[in-house]
Structure formats: C-alpha cells, structure tokens
Image: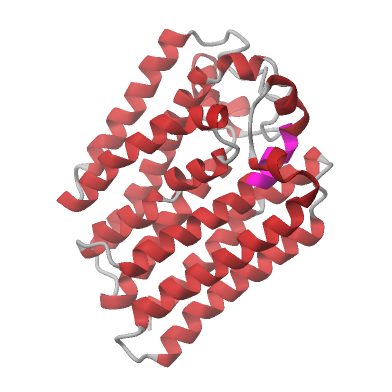
Amino acid sequence: MVSDAPKGNWVDRFAPLATRPYLRLSRADRPIGTWLLLIPCFWGIALAALSDGFRAWDVWLALSCGAGAFLMRGAGCTWNDITDRDFDAAVARTKSRPLPSGQVTVKGALVWMVAQAGIAALILFSYNSLAIGLGIASLALVAVYPFAKRFTWWPQAFLGLAFNWGAVLAYAAHSGSVGLPAVLLYAGGIAWTLFYDTIYAHQDKEDDALIGVKSTARLFGAKTRPWLLGFQALTVLLLAAAVIVALLPQDNLPRLLLALMGVWAFGWHMTWQMRRLDLDDPASCLRVFRANRDAGLIPALFLAMAAWL
C-alpha cells in the first residue's frame, strides 16, 4: 500500500493483485488528481456553451474528457515517478510508491506510460483539428513539469500550465476556436492550481528542504497565507472576467448573474478552506487540498446551468 493513499480505496480492495502496482503508479488509488485535471475541461465546455448552447456532441466531449483525464493523469504521474524515483525514495510520504519501493521496474513503468498515452490519443483524435493540435502541444508541458522543482521555486506554476490546459482544449473542441474567455479561464485555473498545490506542497516542506527540492511552499514559508489569499482573489477575478467577456455580446443579465454566482460560491469555498487550514499539519494540508474537487465543481455546475438558460 502507498502511505498517502486513502484508506480502503478501490485499488487496494478490488483490483487484481498483478495490476495494483501499475494502478498505484497512475494514482488510480488517489482520484483527486484526475478530478483536478478534469474540472477545467468541464469549465471550458460550459464556458463555450454560454455563447451557443449545449449540443449532443458535448455529451461525448464531457465523457471523453473524463476518460482522457484519467489516462493522461496516469501517464503524467508515471512519467513524474520515473523522473523523481530517487527523490521519492528519500521522502517519507512517497518512498512507498511503486518505483522507489521496487514494485515496478523503470522499463515496466515506461511501457505502462506509453500504453496510457496511446489510448488517450485515440480519444483526442475524435476532436476537431484545433483541439488535436492543442492536445499534442500539451505533451511539452507534461514532459517539463517533473523537472521544474529542480530549477525553479515555482514548480506549482508549471503544474498549473499543464493541469489547466484542458480548459482551452475543451473550449476549442466545442467552439472550434480559442477566444479571450478561454484564455482568461486558463489563467484563472493556473491561479487556482497555485492555491491548492502550494497547500499540498506544505506536506513535504521539511523533506524537500533536506533533499534540495524547490516549491512555493518553501519559497513563501511563514508568508504563505497572504500568498494564498492573493491566488484566491486572482482566481475569482479571472474566472469572473472570463464569464463577463463570454456573455458581453448577449446582454443576458439572468445568465450572467447565475454564472457569476457560481464564481462567487467558488471563492467562498476557498475562504472556507483557508479557515480550516493548518499549514504545519500535513493531515490538514491533505484534507484541504482534497476539498478542491468540490470547490472546482461549483463553478462548473453554475456555468452549465447558465448555459441551459
């Protein structure tokens, strides 16, 4: 078992024994990462639909984004663990992962990574040409991210660039173009990732300091809370701007108010997280980090309802 996986997760309980190390390598026992990759896709679909409404195609788009998020998160985590296997062996929380613990070989992990990415590519090729191009371009971000902690204090920003790319891709898959609303949405997602992944990084700040791994948690230190408040404000402002720009040509006040209500509720949830966060307690950091699944689904729901109006 991996030490930081939720107790009683489906991989440990139900998956065939031979598959468990590979599913753990993909973080299938910790679905929060898949949600955080998928939610910006939901945002992108719903934001695009604010302009011209939902179509039958969007059902496939939402379902395929779910499958693609699971597969590409798995491939990305596999790549991350291949590059970080020596670091992971030196950190208490990660030394039980499949590669540092010897459950999977590097060759086996590479084969598993390619298999996941290959299946995800079949899904991507069902989209329009712009979305396909954006999906291929995202591979550069996925490839670079694991190395960011070696050369910058801002690896969380690189994670934000990669994890929120789906907002632009899904927007393009619906609309066939990438407009300013999608760019603002993407920027808001990056600010959100800086918020939640800085919280996540506080779990490992002591081990990271010992082995020389950089993070925003170490960079901000005792000043982390003001930075988190800044990321929270920036997230809300950018998402609100994306909604306003998307709906400006329509002059539809009920739709605008409903969408902005979702953004406001999202910001309120982040405030709720801050009140319960103890940055010196790893368990508290993990709980608050996981709460961002529910936080991110709030604007997705309100954007979808506004698009239906």
Residue 87 visible in the shown view: yes
Label total for image: 0
Q: Residue at point 25% right, 43% down? A: 124
Quadrant of image for the N terminus: top right
Q: Is residue 261 left or right of residue 125?
A: right
Q: Residue at point 23% right, 51% down? A: 131
Above-or-below relation of 255 to 197: below
Q: Nearer the viewer, residue 47 or 180?
A: 180
Q: Is residue 134 left or right of residue 236?
A: left
Q: Nearer the viewer, residue 4 or 172?
A: 172
Above-or-below relation of 48 to 152: below
Q: Residue at point 68% right, 33% down? A: 8
Quadrant of image for the C terminus: bottom left
The x and y percentages for residue 105 are 49, 8
Q: Is residue 162 left or right of residue 212?
A: left
Quadrant position of residue 62 = bottom left
The x and y percentages for residue 83 are 49, 19
The residue furthest left is: 129
Quadrant position of residue 121 = top left
Above-or-below relation of 216 to 14: below
Give the extent of the magenta segment.
Answer: 198-204
The x and y percentages for residue 246 are 35, 76
Q: Residue at point 67% right, 18% down? A: 96
Above-or-below relation of 7 to 100: below
The x and y percentages for residue 299 are 51, 68
Q: Is residue 200 magenta?
A: yes
Q: Is residue 36 magenta?
A: no
Q: Main secondary structure of the magenta part?
A: helix
